[in-house]
Image (cartoon, rainbow, N blue to C red):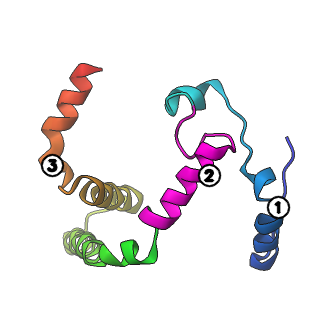
Amino acid sequence: MNVIVVSSPQMADRLFRNHDVLCAKRLISEVSHHLSYGSKGIIFTPYCPYWQNARKLCVMELLSASKIRSFAWLREEECSKLMTSLKVASSNNHAVDVGTLVGGVLEELIYRIFYGAPKNDLIWVLELLSSRL
């Protein structure tokens, strides 16, 4: 496996502009094939027109500056909840696993952005899906 280490943002920009196709090639493993429903997700899909369209969709629609800004209130709300829970734990002299708390915040953000509701409101959907699998 060939590996390239890039140490500056300017070099990374130059590399991706000139050699985007080479950097987009991925090894397809048995695990990635199963995890991404036959390599259909943007992460494991080999470079092809499907991947190009999926990338364009992500950049233009999901990760656009206006879309990111539109959820600023939600990020602020979740960060405020995180800070409150840290403050409570601190005042009670409890140890906290910050990694777990941050992971929970990220999970809650994903649920609220993609599904429009907190995870706890969607537990019945998750249970239904797991019972069908």
Q: What residue sits right under mark 1 in the picture?
A: 5
- Within the magenta stretch, is there residue 58? yes
Single out the mark in the foreground, 2 or 3.
Answer: 2
- Quarter of the image for the N terminus: give it: top right
Residue 7: x %, y % from top left: 81, 71
Residue named by callout 2: 52
Instruction: Check disc 3 and report the residue beneath it.
Output: 120
Q: Position of residue 81 (x, y in %)?
A: 21, 71
Residue type pointed to by label 3: Asn
Marks 1/3 in contact by CB < 8 Å: the verdict is no
Residue drawn at point x = 18 percent, y = 28 percent:
128
Marker disc for residue 76? none
Three-letter residue code for mark 1: Val
Name the residue located 74 percent from the left edge and 77 percent from the top edge.
9
Real-space CA distance between mark 1 and mark 3, rounded to the nearest whole angstrom: 42 Å
Instruction: Identify the residue at image location x=36%, y=59%.
Output: 106
> Which image quadrant is residue 113 in?
bottom left
Separation of residues labelled 2 and 3 (CA atoms)? 35 Å
Disc 3 is placed on an element classified as: helix
The residue range painted magenta reads 39-61
Q: Is residue 66 above or below residue 108?
A: below
110 left or right of 123? right
Q: Earlier in the sequence, mark 1 or mark 3?
A: 1
First along the sequence among labels 2 and 1: 1
Query: How far, Cα to Cα, is label 2 from label 1?
Result: 24 Å
